[in-house]
Image: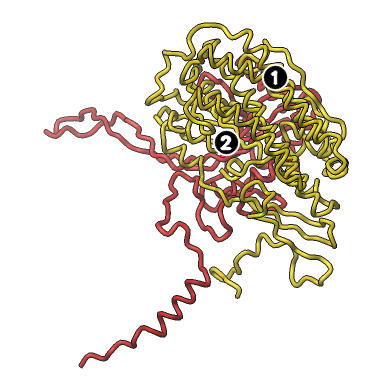
Amino acid sequence: MTLSLQGQPLGTSTRLLDGEADGSILEVSMGPHHPSTHGVFRMNVALDGETVVKLKPVFGYLHRNHEKIAESISYLGSIPYSDRLDYFCSMTNNWAYVLSVEKLGGFAVPERAEYIRVIVAEMTRLLNHGCLIGFLAQDLGAMGTPLMYAFRQREKILDLFEALTGARMMCNYMRFGGVRVDLSPEWLQAVRKLVDEYPAFIDELEALLSENEILKPRLQEVGVLSRELAVQAGVTGPGLRASGVPYDIRKVDGYGVYPRLQFRVPIGEHGDCYDRYMIRLLEMRESLVLLKQALDQIPAGPFTNPQIKLRNLRPKAGEAYGRIEAPKGELGFYLISDGKGEPYRYRVRPPSLINLTPLEDMCLGQNIADVVAILGSIDIVLGEVDR
Amino acid sequence: MTTETLSLLDRVRERLESAFPGKSFPIIQNTSPAAQHSLLLSSEDAVEVAKFLRDGDGLKFDYLSNVTGVDWPERQIPEKKQVQVPAPDGNGTVTKEETTTHTEPGYLEAVYHLYSMELRHGPLIFRLRTQDRGEKNHLPSLTPVWRSAEFQEREVYDLFGIHFDGHPDLRRILMWEEFQDYPMRKDFVEPDDYEYEPTPHGKVLERVKARTTPAPQEVK
């Protein structure tokens, strides 16, 4: 039965093949409930045998117009909502948003708060990258083991988040000009213990996967993203660096206290799925380096700026764009204030959505089974793609 | 940081003025402490200017980070004027204050944030404005210059209703394709049957209703 609305047949604009298929090309709708689409994401794939000849992503299944909602509530009210964008990394979402508001209002942040932010953001990066590798292996058929290893480790970080903020995932932790609650020395001690134990987990993961006979042919030379296309298509984060572009906003913008900390930016050579996998392992090790320094250097002092009125905040009219290096790429917030209590314009620059721009180019000529590996290595969260 | 951004903007503006003689590139001031000022480009030569920004020596804005829309509806601006009116007692005139309003036309705006991955500078912000919010809501698409605009311009089209001419695949991206309005506009009114979609179930119900409802009785 063909449904139509105002003369237009429904569901046609996402179709890939015009007219009747001649039987040689098959159109498959992958998703929105495919187990490897990391949520409700759909790809329309045209296949010649098993080879992808065309691919179109279809978005919007999780769309709730976060931006419109944020434009009708106070600046403070959007912080818990920003947790729900990329629900794996609520801490970095918070940071990107409060950073933009701090730029908009010209607010200063005390030194201790900056260190706290680095600590929780790098912990977020650890859990995101660990789980991503687990999911990638799961998508390729390694049911359970690597993902459960990653989840076991993630749970240790989430326990610390819960001890600090009261929530495992939706932390709602940062505030304009600081953070909500201070760290205790016991908590810092627990993080130190975690940092000391973490390399054993990365070694374990690497021993399990890096030289794996199945994983290597499934990832190497699959989904190659050239350096030029990566820059042109606005890919950011580990996906960009795997293609050989040394661009890390922590280094380029030097926000927070990152300029004071020593760390290296790993870059890949081939831009294939294996490089994207490897970059995450290396970034986890660099995050541990960062965490160690931040734990050693964290000063005593105030953890928030008492001069900022959190409730009923009315920044001067103007606009600001702030961005951070979130685990998935450049997460930016663009805010326009007209002097009222709610933002006139509130825009999220979602790394997950924009990293999908070259998805078709990466998948063309690959097998349908490789699409799963490519999507898994890009690292998307649909809460952020659809907003 | 603030002065750096300003000087980058001034430098870019000088380069643009020498490369495109006779064109003006006004700066839109940003009054917030962020002081991220922006350039206003005209839509006729936007593609040429964008290519120059991407490829020009010392500019090399190879990375388009963010594209977004802003809705600026029509505004009534009150103006106070001193006018001479005849005095009520008929002798001469008295000065009276009169308030008139003039209408500032509304427009839609697309804002682009550029960075350079090669030279590591940025952000450079520029804006394009449509003529109005109705029929003349067309802007040139910059997707041929930067691929990263592809989904973002689709999103601006979807939520704000700016038509990007030259976009390879301008369709709704987040809302469903039958959706009629542009939700991010300031004057958008939420429909009460938000999730309405014709379903086979609805058609079946109509048929059942037609069969089971008795024909109206004639009243004598």
Q: Position of residue B71 (x, y in %)?
A: 50, 41
The residue labelled by disc 1 is A288
The reply to whether residue A139 is in sight is yes
The N terminus of chain A, quarter of image: bottom right
Tell me how the rendering is colored. by chain
The residue labelled by disc 2 is A348
The reply to whether residue B23 is in sight is no
Circle nearer the viewer, 2 or 1: 1
- Tag 2 secondary structure: strand
The C terminus of chain A, quarter of image: top right
Q: Colour of chain A?
A: yellow
Residue A95, quarter of picture = top right
| Amino acid type assigned to the residue bearing label 2 in the image | Val
- Tag 1 secondary structure: helix
Residue at the left extreme of this rendering: B89
The chain painted red is B
